[in-house]
Amino acid sequence: MLSFSPPDISQAEIDEVVDTLKSGWITTGPKTKQLERELADFCGTPRVACLSSATTALESVLRLLGIGPGDEVITSAYTYTASASPIVHVGATPVLVDVAPDSYEMDYAALADAITDKTRAVIPVDLAGRMVDYDALRDAVGSARWSATSDLLEQIGHLPIIADGAHSLGAVRKGERSGQAADITTFSFHAVKNFTTAEGGAATWRSGTFDDDDEIYRQFMLLSLHGQTKDALAKDKAGSWEYDIAFPGWKCNMTDIQAALGLAQLRRYPALLDRRHRMAAMYAGLLADANVQLMQHAQGDPQVDGFRSSGHLMLVRLPGRSRAFRDELIERLAARGVPANVHYKPLPLLTAYQDLGFAPDSYPNALAQFENEITLPLHTLLTDEDVQLVSREFCEVKAQMEEEGLR
């Protein structure tokens, strides 16, 4: 049985973690700060705040901006719960927008119509590692009715775009790297992501979003460590025990053990991205005659008018096939040792969001995407032979099912 998405851990990661364990710093310390600096350089952004997950990063962003009860935040109906649950965590109201027909991106016309005088932010989702069309997104929100209800919202000066870039670290679109296109971007470093710290995440923001980047970073650190004005690294300096609690904060800091993994991963990351793109191109060639629709991971010149994703997920649609067909295909592939998955169940299909009043029938395009979507393995521990095997088994099982009259 092939693995669907194992972490790619080399001796370099092991050595960094061992070095950390021997250093005496295993919680937030020098390696976390180093990773933040190197990620900011990689993304081309002024600062990066590393935290315990993408979920806590997104929640911290909303709290930082003063978004809470009485406010509305828009996100996509086609995503994982982590894009929307932080909205609920801060007491704001989530507003879900359907995707466009035959697309994984929000319908930008519907997005414009969903904006009200209570809307405080929009959270687009870079699904599978492909950045959304931020030009179209900015046009959709550019003339929106909007009012700033906090000093930082006033600094941004327009309806904020907070990208859920959980999948898109390293992606580029029209000359903008993930982290530069939105006002603020959050990343996930979970074990199944391209770049991992086991658990972990980060927030970053593009230059010019705020008046004082260092102060924004300081606020993220306060949010992540009980509102304490000094972290353990600062308090470790001789005579520097004194601290204050600025407000009753939370506890979602990254540790140096996690950051050690990230430092080694970041050194390897350009090569890992290239490998993912080579495999995506292999899939495209091997499945060219299979009557499927593949998400494109590269198009044109990403520095001019095209894009290059992070190659996170191999999303495959089965035109004209039902949810039952898709589910049976997954089961038959598993019997042959080939794992497959689905990304994702639209939020209105989940109990938590139905309890919030979201009806599945109100999101027909998201449901249509989901009904016949299947995700094939795409990770850097696969060999070329593995990709050929997965493609061959997929084509054989699909053809067999169609010969049996299954639809």
Image (cartoon, grey):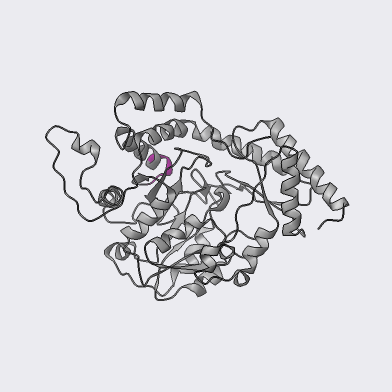
Asked whether residue 102 appears in the rendered view, the answer is no
Residue 99: give x, y in percent of width and height: 59, 64
Q: Quadrant of residue 366?
A: bottom right
Residue 31: give x, y in percent of width and height: 33, 33
The residue sitting at 29% across, 27% down in the picture is 24
Question: In the figure, is residue 27 to the left or right of 262?
Answer: left
Q: Nearer the viewer, residue 31 or 236?
A: 236
Q: Nearer the viewer, residue 379 or 199?
A: 199
Classify 12 as above or below 246. above
Q: Nearer the viewer, residue 27 or 117?
A: 27
Residue 284: give x, y in percent of width and height: 71, 44
Classify 340 as above or below 359. above
For the record, the magenta segment spans 41-45
The residue sitting at 30% across, 33% down in the picture is 30
Question: In the figure, is residue 84 to the left or right of 244?
Answer: right
Q: Quadrant of residue 18?
A: top left
The residue sitting at 48% across, 57% down in the picture is 83
Question: In the figure, is residue 130 to the left or right of 154?
Answer: right
Please name the predominant secondary structure of the magenta segment in the image.
helix
Asked whether residue 210 appears in the rendered view, the answer is yes
Q: Is residue 114 magenta?
A: no
Residue 128: give x, y in percent of width and height: 57, 49
In what quadrant of the picture does the N terminus appear?
A: top right
In what quadrant of the picture does the C terminus appear?
A: bottom right
